[in-house]
Amino acid sequence: MTTRIARQKVLAIVLAGGRGSRLSPLTDERAKPAVPFLGTYRLIDFTLSNLVHSGVQDVWVIEQYLPHGLNDHLSGGRPWDLDRTRGGLVVMPPFSSPDNEDGEFSQGNAHALAQHAHLIREFGPDLVLVLSADHIYRLDHAEVIRAHLEHGASVTMVTTELDDPAGATRFGNVRVDDQGRVTEFAYKPDEPLGPTVTAEVFVYRADVLLGALETLERRGELGDYGEYLLPELVARGDAYAFALEGYWMDVGTLDAYLQTHRDFLDGKGFALDDPEWPFITSSLARPPAHVARTARLDDAFVCGGAVVAGEVTRSVIGPNAVVEAGAVVRDSVVQPGAAVRAGAVVSRAVVDTSAEVGAGARVGGQSANSRPTVVGAHARVEAGADIGPGRVVAPHAAVRPGEEDETAPEAERSK
């Protein structure tokens, strides 16, 4: 009943514990993997869908920050057929133990793996597949595993090429030789090695991983796996890269989050409804979207239960969201249950779940290069208020005309 690919026992560990502060306020009241995407999905849906279609059915989800909403979405693994009698999806919350009765939150993803090392040993995998829960991509992990075995690798890093090498400073950078061997690795360097970065998917030989974690723990060198773990394995000379073909995006910043929605609107993403590889989510049945005769739609995704009577251009309107007659939504994401009232203008912004933009209010900048504006979940922008580009409204807050500077401050710039 356990997952075996190429005769190897495989355990997948999904790291879903980080706060995702660069996506604030979208992550102020929910875990980053539970942030909605394209209205219908949550970010973690792409990781889980890729796993089950690859034949991986032993999946651990390590949680930490605000896990309750994420657990509600995971539904015990049922939407992905991971609610199995043996194996399937297992949620791993923070815990205490006889050795540490007070419990401890992990201080980085390598530390999170080390905290669960005894459980990994008990499971007894041949290979450990470690993934992040907040990237948008399509990948057959079975192909990565086969390449890993062919190379006899200690670790195989899935890599992708950035259009702008300057952005590599946010990721693990690699240099690769003609045989695919990783010859150099740098974690978030000040000067990029080049456009090739890790896509936050790694296949480890289990015995090598556990041995390295034990060594690093003795040295006090855990933290994130890019800091010590991966350099340790690259130094062995048997770390390899697997190039991911096709679309990949880390949506860890507000700019990237909006850009990824735009990419799918422009057809740059991948098929979401491929019958051989559908992306699966946990969602309620909703009535059809209602597009009124006063509506104008141009290049938009409109989800079930939405009511659109205004103008929507290059935007996503989530389930049960409302855009009233006379309202304008451009280059934006209106999340589930949010409302944009008559005469309001929303541009280059995210209006989060159940938030409301009042009649005649203005949210966001008009330029394509404007910094994103975010109205937090359940917040209210009162009629006539004007919130400029790059500002954020905290969840549940109210913004009244004349009080925008106090109640909608500028967002911190992402590093």
Image: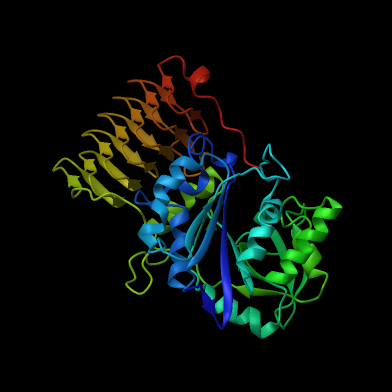
Q: Quick check: 310 left or right of 366?
A: left
| Horizontal and vertical percent position of residue 67 | 50, 42
Q: Residue at x 42, y 25 (%)?
A: 396
Quadrant in which the C terminus appears: top right
- Residue closest to the far top: 402
- Residue closest to the far right: 219
Which corner quadrant of the image does residue 264 belong to? bottom left
Nearest the camera: 1 or 50?
Answer: 1
Q: Quick check: 21 left or right of 325?
A: right
Nearest the camera: 200 or 268?
Answer: 200
144 lies above or below 404:
below
Which corner quadrant of the image does residue 52 belong to? bottom left
193 lies above or below 180:
above
| Horizontal and vertical percent position of residue 268 | 43, 63
306 lies above or below 327:
below
| Horizontal and vertical percent position of residue 13 | 58, 60
Q: Residue at x 83, y 69 (%)?
A: 235
Is residue 237 visible to us here? yes
